[in-house]
Image: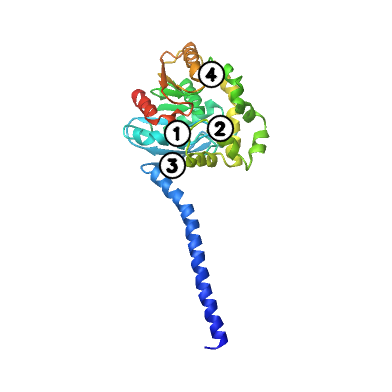
Amino acid sequence: MDEEQSNSGTRTLLGIAALGVALAGSGYAIARTVAPRLAARRRDRGLSFGTARVHGAVLHFARAGRGPAVILLHGFPQDWHAWRPVIDRLAKRFTVIVPDLRGIGGSTAGSDKFDDATMAADIRDLAKALKLDRPYIVGHDIGGQVAHAFALQFSQATRGAMILDTPLPGVDGWDECMANPGLWHVGFLQTPELPETLLAGRHAPFFEHMLGFGDFAPEQVAESLKAYGSAAQLHAACGIYRAFDRNVRFTREHHGANDVPLVLGMGARSPLFALAPRIARGLRDGGFAKVEEATVADAGHFLINDQPDAVAALIERHA
């Protein structure tokens, strides 16, 4: 074998070795990419996904089960994934629909309107598009405020609503909550343009801080970060908070007799727990004739994650 052939053979062997290293490295990279996707697929087994153009927005939603319809509405800083801990159980008895609110997660806004009345109209149009008969509406946090607006605006279109761990605009206890320094994020997100500028491309520390009041796994935090990661999603979140004053006016304009059964549920360890009797009384004073209070034991504000079985049982009992 001459020198050229020897060098050629050496280069070939080195090339094969390099290819092996590259393939091994890419396999590791692929594994790191694919493994979370496979885990998500396993978690989402039994779910189907779709979108619907409603009230100017396009809502992304998850769907599971068969039976009387239940619509689950998430709060901030979460998306539809917030309800994953209870979907499998509820799907054994109900048709479960879990949308992302307009502008959040997989949903788009279509306009700059993020008030509760508009988002409730989104949900009403979604129910129509899916041919759901008088769905029971359950909302946590911001989603609870939308559920309240739904009951005010579309009382004949639902068999009841459950409001979980949130104050309600225009209802007793609201002003006290808004004045609480612990809710500093409300004023921050309401500030024109500033939060979008400060959080663009670096929203993780803020959202991780907000989620730090619950006990979330890293993959759950990652889902929330993704749901609010774009400029449009951040703007939607801020728009929801900037609409609070409009929501107060909407509630006061819709005071009057209302026979939609309401359940007001609070986590026993939630900072809002002590306000529950005042909120319930405010709902009755505003015209709701059927208001029931419920407590989820050993749960904080993020009660769905803290006590999923207790929350699912509460929904089963009333839906």
**Residue 181 as seen in the image, left or right of residue 69:** right
Which of pointers 1 and 4 indicates the residue nearer the eye? Answer: 4
Which of pointers 1 and 2 indicates the residue nearer the eye? Answer: 2
Q: Is residue 283 above or below residue 128?
A: above
Q: Is residue 122 above or below residue 11?
A: above
Q: Is residue 25 above or below residue 6?
A: above
Q: Does dot 2 land on a helix, a strand or a loop?
A: helix
Q: Work out whether mark 3 precedes mark 4 in sequence or the reverse, and give the earlier one.
A: 3
Instruction: Give the residue drawn at x 43%, y 45%.
Output: 40
- Residue that mark 4 sits on: 251
**Residue 298 as seen in the image, left or right of residue 22:** left
**Residue 193 as seen in the image, left or right of residue 71:** right
Q: Work out whether mark 3 precedes mark 1 in sequence or the reverse, and give the earlier one.
A: 3
Q: What is the CA distance from the residue labelled 3 to the residue labelled 4? A: 31 Å
- Residue that mark 1 sits on: 126
Image position, residue 196 (x, y; %): 64, 37
Q: What is the CA distance from the residue labelled 1 to the residue labelled 2? A: 29 Å
Image-quadrant location for residue 248: top right
Which of pointers 2 and 4 indicates the residue nearer the eye? Answer: 2
The kind of residue tagged 4 is Thr
Q: Does dot 1 land on a helix, a strand or a loop?
A: helix
- Residue that mark 3 sits on: 50
Q: What is the CA distance from the residue labelled 2 to the residue labelled 4? A: 27 Å
